[in-house]
């Protein structure tokens, strides 16, 4: 099976940088802050594949580069370097193809224009943020939040958008009768479910989950995770799941990457990572949650 998307040597530097940035940062130095120029190497040469209908977990401490990775792949931030390629089978039929030399993969998506990236994001991707205030307009109705996403994906019929909104809210266990209420009236768990409904509205192939259970009560976490598992199966989603909670990763993901100081220090099957960690940092992570 060929990967849905291939990521090679993806990097993000905050700051001007200097010749010592690579030498003075990384897991071996236990920091991603350059001691010479003060630049932050948030991601450094991150490479991996994401397959169809796969959930890939990304774990690590705060500041390890997990959320930066999501922002780069969702085209919210500009990468400092690297290559992101999409398989031809996933390319939206309404967008012009950018395949050269008979390859099954696109050219580097990081080189597309802002408009092309926005088109691709609207056609293929969905995202659920840790903080619902980032992903939702809190004083716009829940149905209106979903309709905003649908408009970006090319929908124009109001009746169909309302039907789609009610359908998704029902799937995410939000009472349809509250579709015209703003998310600011909802609990934290309900706000996250509205975010999930919004993220799924354009039938994405790739769903990014960025610490979606952080700050929720344990019972609410369990319901949210069970919902995500069911929706992944129903919609055949590929997911990139960012979390510091190994329990969440174990429940949702087949494979896992461990990040520290902007680098991937270990990757493999989730069972293998949790039961027989090889890198010292992974061993500390696993031991801390036993």
Image: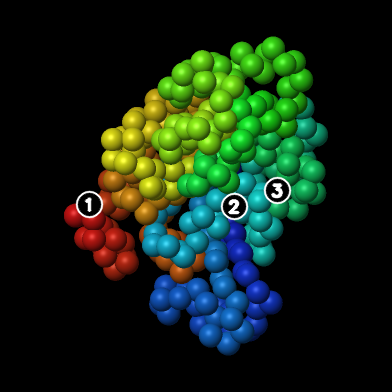
166 sits to left or right of 246: right
Q: Is residue 64 above or below residue 251?
A: below
Q: Quickly name the residue at label 2.
A: 71
> What is the CA distance from the residue labelled 1 to the residue labelled 3?
36 Å
Q: Quickly name the residue at label 1.
A: 275
The location of residue 4, given as percent across then percent down, is 56, 38
Contact, mark 1 vs mark 3 (Cβ under 8 Å): no
Determine which quarter of the picture holds residue 149. top right
Determine whether the residue tagged by mark 1 lies in a helix, strand or loop.
helix
What colouring method underlies this structural image?
rainbow
As rendered, which of 47 and 115 lies closer to the eye?
Answer: 115
Identified at 58% across, 46% down, the residue is 134
Determine whether the residue tagged by mark 2 lies in a helix, strand or loop.
helix
Identified at 75% across, 53% down, the residue is 111
Label 3 vs label 2, nearer the camera: 2
As rendered, which of 12 and 179 lies closer to the eye?
Answer: 179
Mark 1 neighbour class, 10 Å CA radius: few under 14, some 14 to 19, many 20 or more: few
Label ID, residue 109: 3
As rendered, which of 124 and 215 lies closer to the eye?
Answer: 215
Identified at 66% across, 49% down, the residue is 75
Q: Is residue 249 above or below residue 9?
A: above
98 sits to left or right of 56: right
Mark 3 neighbour class, 10 Å CA radius: few under 14, some 14 to 19, many 20 or more: some
Determine which quarter of the picture holds residue 144. top right
């Amino acid at each position: 099976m060929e990967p849905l998307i291939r990521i090679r040597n993806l990097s993000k530097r905050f700051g001007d940088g200097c010749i010592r940035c690579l030498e003075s940062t990384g897991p071996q130095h236990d920091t991603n802050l350059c001691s010479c120029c003060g630049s932050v190497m948030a991601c450094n040469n991150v490479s991996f594949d994401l397959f169809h209908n796969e959930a890939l977990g990304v774990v690590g401490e705060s500041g390890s580069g997990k959320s930066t990775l999501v922002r780069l792949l969702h085209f919210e931030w500009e990468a400092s370097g690297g290559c992101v390629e999409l398989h031809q089978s996933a390319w939206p039929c309404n967008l012009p193809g950018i395949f050269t030399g008979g390859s099954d993969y696109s050219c580097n998506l990081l080189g597309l224009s802002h408009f092309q990236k926005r088109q691709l994001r609207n056609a293929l991707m969905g995202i659920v943020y840790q903080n619902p205030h980032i992903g939702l307009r809190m004083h716009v109705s829940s149905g209106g939040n979903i309709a905003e996403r649908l408009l970006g994906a090319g929908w124009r019929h109001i009746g169909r958008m309302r039907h789609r909104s009610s359908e998704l809210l029902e799937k995410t266990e939000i009472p349809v009768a509250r579709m015209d209420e703003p998310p600011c009236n909802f609990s934290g768990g309900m706000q996250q479910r509205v975010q999930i409904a919004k993220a799924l509205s354009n039938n994405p192939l790739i769903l990014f989950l960025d610490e979606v259970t952080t700050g929720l009560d344990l019972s609410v976490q369990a319901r949210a995770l069970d919902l995500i598992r069911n929706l992944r199966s129903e919609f055949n989603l590929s997911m990139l799941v960012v979390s510091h909670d190994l329990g969440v990763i174990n429940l949702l993901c087949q494979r896992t990457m461990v990040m520290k100081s902007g680098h991937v220090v270990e990757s493999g099957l989730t069972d293998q990572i949790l039961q027989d960690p090889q890198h010292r940092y992974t061993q500390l992570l696993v031991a801390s949650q036993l």
